[in-house]
Image (cartoon, rainbow, N blue to C red):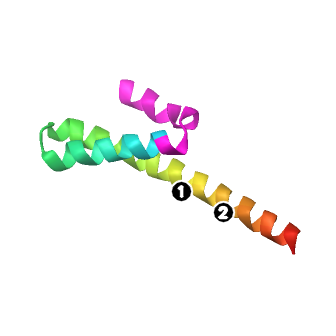
Amino acid sequence: MAEKNENNDTKDLTFEQAVKKLTDIVGKIENGQISLEQSLSQYEQGMELIKYCRGTLQKAEKKIEEISKNRE
């Protein structure tokens, strides 16, 4: 259950913090030093982080487009 709460806290992370957490998760899974159940839980959290990061990047892209349009 604690993992679910961490997933819900992605909105409180900066983009950089989310990428760091995602990198840490990938490392844990790739090293194979955690159980299958933990791997699945970490994978689920990683997918939430990816979704959050993509959304953040899309917002930044839109803002850049708006700024560029306003300057033309």
Disc 1 residue type (three-letter): Arg
Q: Is residue 51 magenta?
A: no
Indicate the secondary structure of the residue bearing disc 1. Answer: helix
Indicate the secondary structure of the residue bearing disc 2. Answer: helix
* Mark 2–mark 1 distance (CA, rounded to whole Å): 10 Å
Residue located 53% across and 56% down the image: 54
Nearer the viewer's eye, disc 2 or disc 1?
A: 2
- Residue 24 visible here: yes
Q: Which mark is residue 54?
A: 1
What kind of secondary structure does the magenta stretch mostly adopt? helix
* Rendering quarter of residue 65: bottom right
Q: Is residue 5 left or right of residue 39?
A: right
Q: Nearer the viewer, residue 25 or 66?
A: 66
Q: Residue under circle 2?
A: 61
Q: Nearer the viewer, residue 27 or 29?
A: 27
Disc 2 residue type (three-letter): Glu
Q: Is residue 3 magenta?
A: yes
Question: Residue 49, position in %: x, y?
Answer: 45, 46
